[in-house]
Amino acid sequence: MSAFLEALAGHAFLQHALAAGVLASIACGIVGSYVVVKRIGYLAGGVAHTVLGGMGIAYFLGKSPIGGALIAALLAALIIGWVSLRLRQHEDTIIGALWAVGMATGILFISRTPGYNVDLMSYLFGNILMVPRADLLLMAGLDGVIVALVWLFRKQFLAVCFDEEFARLRGVPVDLFYLGLLLIVALTVVILIQVVGLVLVIALLTLPAAIASQYARSLAAMMLTATLLGVVFTSAGLALSYEPDLPAGATIILLAGLAYLLSTLGRGIWLRWRRTTALPEAKS
């Protein structure tokens, strides 16, 4: 840990990595809470894996892969949202097809790019240590958009997540806000790509929020707790991976996964103990 702190003070790339982890945690804490409550993790997974197609095309055309990821994520969110609303009985098959086609398209365009740079494959598994300052500014801007949208439409998103029928009766355009929620998920996916990559993005999007849901009593508290947990996981993952030279993204996810398992087991044991101690009191 001391070696990491010393390196952090003297190396800009580690400072950028730490900042990227904090920015990603803000997005995954807020949006991940919606994903967990609404139970749309598989939709978010479809968006995440379709993104590789946009990245591959952008790279082939000599453009920014992150720009391609942003466009592909927003388009995928709209398509998957429309499929979910209109073709619910076939949504698993269609989302799976988009998932596979997006990945295949990205790989094909990457393979045909002259002077193909292998570093692009880090987007599959993340490379938080290589986040440039320009991408940090983009991540901060996307975070700002997400926070603003969630704040402005918090009541509508809350109604869509917890009681769609009541929201419809109150005149809330549920379908519109459902699509809006998926677009926000798409923005979050683009942010998280920088940290853990496409393959691991759903874990960081859901695990902090899933842990927070076990203890928080309101959605706002859940978002705040999930954000703080995200900061802890990304920072600790960076520190733990630095000296043994382990992949930072994978270390972050393993840490989050272990915390989720321990939290779930610990809470289960605690609740069972509470029930067993409450029974004798009730009988007496």
Image: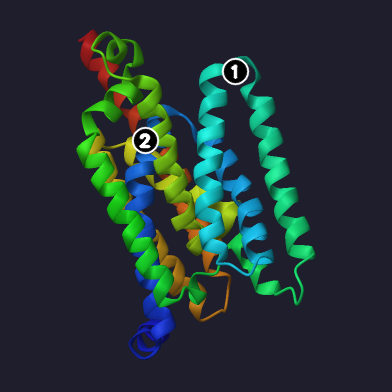
Q: Is residue 113 left or right of residue 54?
A: right
**Residue lying at 35% horizontally and 68% vertically, measured from the top left:** 137
Query: Regarding mark 2 in the picture, which secondary structure is present there?
Result: helix
Residue type (three-letter) at the residue carrying disc 1: Leu
Give x and y (percent) for residue 134.
41, 73
Task: Tell me how the rendering is colored.
Answer: rainbow
Q: Dot 2: few (<14), some (14–19), or many (≥20) neighbours within 10 Å?
A: many
Viewer-nearest residue: 141 or 212: 141
Q: Which residue is mark 2?
A: 34
Q: Quadrant of residue 95?
A: top right
Q: Is residue 22 left or right of residue 182?
A: left
Q: Dot 1: few (<14), some (14–19), or many (≥20) neighbours within 10 Å?
A: few
Residue 73, numbered label: none
Give x and y (percent) for residue 261.
48, 44
Viewer-nearest residue: 49 or 250: 49
Give x and y (percent) for residue 214.
34, 35
**Residue lying at 40% horizontally and 60% vertically, measured from the top left:** 233
45 shown above or below 63: above
Residue type (three-letter) at the residue carrying disc 2: Tyr
Q: Which residue is mark 1?
A: 87
Q: Quadrant of residue 20?
A: bottom left
Q: Is residue 30 left or right of residue 69?
A: left
Examine the rendering and report whether any part of residue 37 can be seen: yes
Query: Regarding mark 1 in the picture, which secondary structure is present there?
Result: loop
Of the residues tagged 1 and 2, which is closer to the observer? 1
**Residue lying at 51% horizontally and 81% vertically, measured from the top left:** 243
77 shown above or below 246: above
Q: Label 2 near label 1: C-beta < 8 Å? A: no
Q: Gap in Å between the C-alphas at discs 1 and 2? A: 22 Å
